[in-house]
Amino acid sequence: MTSRERFLNRINGKPVDRTPFFPDLTKWYEHMRYGDGERDRSFLPGGIIWPDEPLHNLPGIMPERYRDLDFLGVHRAIDCGMPVHGYHIFFNTNIDESVQFAKEQADRQITTTVTTPVGTLREVRTLNATHNWTVTEHMVKSHDDFKVIEYVTEHTESTPDYEPVKKALEMIGDQGYLNLIIPRSPMGRMIHNYAGLLPMTYAIADAPDRGTLLDTLGAPDAVRKLLEAITEKDRELWKIAAEAPGKIAFMADNMDEFLISPVWYRDYFLPVYQEMNAVLHAGGKKVLTHMDGRLKNIFPMIPDSGFDVLDGCCPAPMCDYEPKELAAALGEGQTAYCGVPASYFIPGASHEKILDFAKKILDEMGERVILNVADVLPAEADIETVEKMAELVKSYG
């Protein structure tokens, strides 16, 4: 079987010749190609690295056996699957001319200013030690800023663009699969992108009445209206995704109960997930969600979420559960990525310890698992450990 066939069979409850193994090697490959040299760009975890990308020609510190291979070729040589995130790949975003964006980049920071007739927003992103951009100054700094984001949302339209999807599917071939990345849920965007956790916590607590997601849940009117506006626009995007080529859709709220409480999950996130997944399932899609945090108190709601696959799941000691607890939490027809914690892959790590952990996952999760490194292989990891994991799964069906 091909890696793609193993993945699709596993998530559809069909037999496989061996357990699918799909590690995210993006940041490792980027580091091996650049080495200590100057970097002209940073690749998102799981992001597409096209065959004509100049990165492939950099010798860097790439092990000799992979020196002449591109990213896809490395996966073929290791004999592992390639999970690919298609960020902004199936639609175009059109924003009304009344909204103006200005970006300035200096050193390791990008400052974005958004100017509208109802106010101005400013965001700062900083390049962190792992060569990813992190929001270090959020757009929302007061309740008045909610209406500005609402204005931008209402003056934004999404239209289908499926050619990049077809190109990516052709490039990936049988080595893996393509995720159609759907933007985070409305509250997920508020917490991760627009406002941050603490301001959203205060905003929700500002009103005394509690209800459902679109009936304020204690949020002030400005927050309620914004969530409604985002949800309405997202419904259009879900339909575009449902009709796109490919079989897999993906939403990444990066779930962690220390960030998003079980009560918030139940009232803010679950209704959105259920509605979205119904639309995507009607379009023949299987849907993944990224859950890379502590989850024990969210587990009881997982079967009702409508998701087909949990992605990025990382057991103890990095998070708060064992592989067998994850398996027990899955509902009918649900599958989960589960991997050896990334902290085990530090330079000089014990190969035996990593393989023993992988065996534990395979033994405890059986036919419910897609093995990986939880959730991204560290940049300086020893690739030989991944090669040995690829050999290990050949004895697990």
Image (cartoon, rainbow, N blue to C red):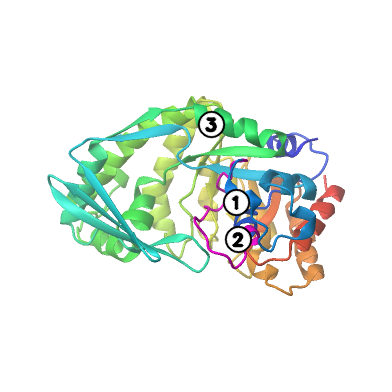
In the rendered image, residue 183, in percent from the top left (x then y), is placed at 42, 43
Q: Nearer the viewer, mark 3 or mark 2?
A: 2
Q: Is-magenta flag for residue 34?
A: yes
Mark 3 to mark 1 CA distance (whole Å): 22 Å
Question: Label 1 amino acid?
Answer: Leu
Give the labeled residue for mark 1: 55
- Give residue 248's quadrant in the image: top right
**Mark positioned earlier in the residue sequence (1 or 2):** 2
For the C terminus, the quadrant is top right
Q: Position of residue 24 (x, y in %)?
A: 64, 53
- Asked which secondary structure carries label 2, the reply is helix
- 328 in the magenta segment: no
Q: Nearer the viewer, residue 146 or 174?
A: 174
Relative side of 24 to 113, left or right: right
Q: Is residue 205 above or below residue 273?
A: below
Q: Position of residue 276 (x, y in %)?
A: 44, 36
Q: What is the number of the mark on residue 34? A: 2
Helix, strand or loop for the magenta stretch, by majority:
loop
Quadrant housing the N terminus: top right
Please, what is the three-letter code of the amino acid marked with disc 2?
Tyr
Do the numbered discs 1 and 2 sit on residues whose CB atoms are within 8 Å? yes
Reading the chain from its start, which is encountered first: label 3 or label 2? 2
Compared with 223, 258 (above or below) is: below
Amino acid found under the numbered disc labelled 3:
Val
Q: Report the magenta residues as a range.
A: 31-51
**Of helix, strand and loop, which one carries label 3?**
helix
The residue at the far bottom in this view is: 348
For the residue labelled by badge 1, is the local secondary structure a helix, a strand or a loop?
Answer: helix
- Dot 2: within a 10 Å radius of its alpha carbon, few (fewer than 14), some, or many (20 or more) residues? some
Q: Residue at x 71, y 36 (%)?
A: 4
